[in-house]
Amino acid sequence: MKIVLIGMPGSGKTTIGKRLAHTLGVQFFDTDDLIENKYHTDISTLFAKYGEPAFRKLEHETLLEILLLDNYVLATGGGLPCFHGNIDIINQTALSFYIQIPLKMLVYRLLAAKKKRPLIVNKDAEELYILLEKTYSERIKYYQKAHHTIEPNTENTVLLIQNIINQKKE
């Protein structure tokens, strides 16, 4: 089984993905971690040094490598589904889940995060909300292509995903 989690930065893809992979007894991957390990630097440095188009190409290549494997949960970077036809590639080879949370909660989570993300560095709450609103409006059409949409604030997300998977097996 291949499960891919997509959504905005700070939506909880990595946290949910780790719990889900543990529950299912499969490997967990995070595209940002894979890229950082492969290139021995952080995402912010890659963004700053090479720019967004080069980074998006690295994400695409990383996605293609992971999709060759079996039995895992993958958390993607927030923009990954929106470039190079990635969401369609994901949907052809894996079960996709869009993790959807309110923008105000994203602002709170991202401002509190220890790890600063390249597109939001040095932004205050108001600037961050405006940026997230714009980014969300550009990305939502890709996120909505996911097989399932999950709102983690309303359900036990891991249990909900497990129930969906069990229904698929029947």
Image: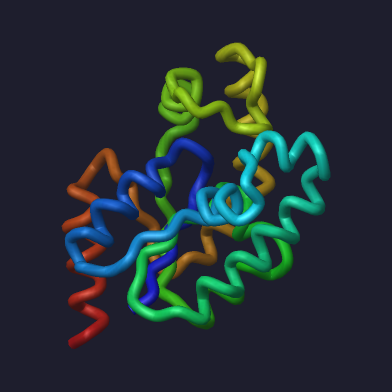
108 with respect to 90 (left or right): left
Residue 142 quadrant: bottom right
76 with respect to 13 (left or right): right
Task: Name the one closer to the observer, 142 or 26.
Answer: 26
Residue 101 quadrant: top left
| Residue positioned 40% across, 50% down in the render | 99
Q: Is residue 85 above or below residue 153?
A: below
Q: Say if residue 37 shows up in the picture.
A: yes
| Residue positioned 33% across, 76% down in the render | 71
Task: Name the one closer to the observer, 23 or 135.
Answer: 23
Instruction: Look at the image and tell me in which quarter the N terminus lies.
Output: bottom left
| Residue positioned 73% across, 66% down in the render | 84
Q: Position of residue 98 (x, y in %)?
A: 44, 56
168 with respect to 102 (left or right): left
169 with respect to 53 (left or right): left
Residue 158 quadrant: bottom left
Q: Where is residue 7 in the image (x, y as percent from the top left)?
A: 49, 49
Q: Is residue 92 above or below residue 81?
A: below
Instruction: Look at the image and tell me in which quarter the C terminus lies.
Output: bottom left
Structure colour scheme: rainbow
Q: Is residue 81 above or below residue 155?
A: below
Q: Position of residue 125 (x, y in %)?
A: 56, 14
Q: Where is residue 93 in the image (x, y as percent from the top left)?
A: 49, 81
Q: Say if residue 104 shows up in the picture.
A: no
